[in-house]
Image (cartoon, grey):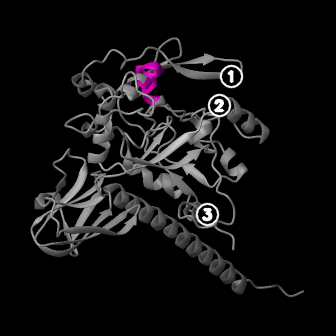
Amino acid sequence: MTMTPRERVQAALNHVQPDFTPCDYYATPEIHEALLKHFGLGPPRSIAGTMGGSASLLEDGGVAERLGVDLRYVNAPYIGPPVATYPDGSSTNLWGIRRRPMPNEYGEYAEPVGAPYAAWTTVEEVEKFPWPNPDWFDYLAMPAICAKYPDLALICGGTHVGDFINGVAFGRGIEQVFIDIASNDPVYLGIGPAEYYTGDWPPPPSPADPAPGSPYSDEQFAWMVSNGVTHVLSFAEIDPLRHPVAMVWIGFDELLSRAWGRFQEPIFLYELSGALPRARFEPPDVAAKAEITELRANRVSVRVESPIAGKVVLGDLDYPGWLCQVDGLTLGREDGRVMASQRHGMDRAVDVPAGTHEIVWVYQPRSLYYGLVVSLLAATQLLLACVVRVLLARRRLAAASSDAATTITPKR
């Protein structure tokens, strides 16, 4: 059975065998222009790259259709303040990063000019920076844009979304970003959620001169145990007599070893003992039990039994969009029972009375409902277009039949 492109992508995301491997298309401007010429299509249509990535491929000029691509990139049109442009061809994107096209032996690439984040030394400087406003986009235009691709899988965003190393390096410098990661620099972490660099969550720094068999400090292992870390992936061997670990695997991984450039040195995987369970009851009680009964990407169920009232904590990020249900009753933040764990404000937590209860966390972000509305509007527009075409065709057929019935053939 032949699938539509959207069904094909959905099948792959659900780990179901599709009829064909889903296909995407993304290319450098030089390759894109060559394909336009090869297929006899017009010149490339470019959109201002306000988000920082190459946006010209959002209007692919028909290349994706010729290649049989299953996906299309759709984004709300930018209606915010005009981006700054300069005589040398450079421009500043929404993130305050100035980039200029620079030629190389294969073509050209928009390289960063300057690094506006490099001089930051405090989190306050991060917070004062004029970050982009979500209201700078025309979301009302999305239904019409999506309606152009009724059977295709749609992607909102692009390669620039979630680009926490390369994209930040454009504004801070690649060397500084790697130093930030190694040292858990609050300024670098401050570009992400506030919980990543406040309170007691940031892990202790790595030892400057690690001893053999101990690439991590005792403070780091204590942090891992208290934060529910269950496994450690290490470039160096860890002594199980000194630290609470047990080796699970050692060797070369086809993906990770190549990505990390470790073609000769093995990778070590250890299981960490004594870590906090993913679901737990607080305060700790010998008779209290919290057990995960269902674990999916968008749904986690926990069954708790306790003779005392307390708090059920799930060691997953308290990300916006997760709804909590206790015994079938959906609780909102205004209820006061649903909260982030007070330990460091990152885990999910809910207060429950004594007894046996079923707690379910379901991921239902507002964007899901926005997407449903957009899909319904697009489907409605498509249905109306089909109805109009059918009615017009019937009207033309009726008119033609009427003309034929009233035509008088003259006698010879």
Prevailing secondary structure of the magenta residues? helix
Residue under pointer 3:
8
Q: Does 4 appear above or below 397?
A: above
The x and y percentages for residue 360 are 28, 68
The image quadrant that residue 337 belongs to is bottom left
Does the rendering let one see residue 95? Answer: no
Stretch in magenta: 167-178
- Quadrant into which the C terminus falls: bottom right
Q: Are marks 1 and 2 in contact (CB under 8 Å)?
A: yes
Q: Is residue 173 magenta?
A: yes
Residue situated in front as seen by the camera: 203 or 189: 203
Nearer the N terminus, badge 1 or badge 2? 2
What is the secondary structure assignment of the residue under circle 2? helix
Does the rendering let one see residue 316? Answer: yes
Residue at the (18%, 68%) spot, across then down = 288
For disc 2, the neighbor class at 10 Å (few under 14, some 14 to 19, many from 20) is: some
Q: Is residue 69 left or right of residue 234?
A: right
Q: Look at label 1 and name its amino acid.
A: Gly
Q: Is residue 216 magenta?
A: no
The image quadrant that residue 352 belongs to is bottom left
For disc 3, the neighbor class at 10 Å (few under 14, some 14 to 19, many from 20) is: many
Q: Look at label 2 and name its amino acid.
A: Pro
Residue situated in front as seen by the camera: 362 or 46: 362
The x and y percentages for residue 338 are 17, 59
Residue under pointer 2:
29
* CA gap, disc 3 and disc 1: 34 Å
Q: Is residue 284 left or right of residue 173?
A: left
Residue under pointer 1:
107
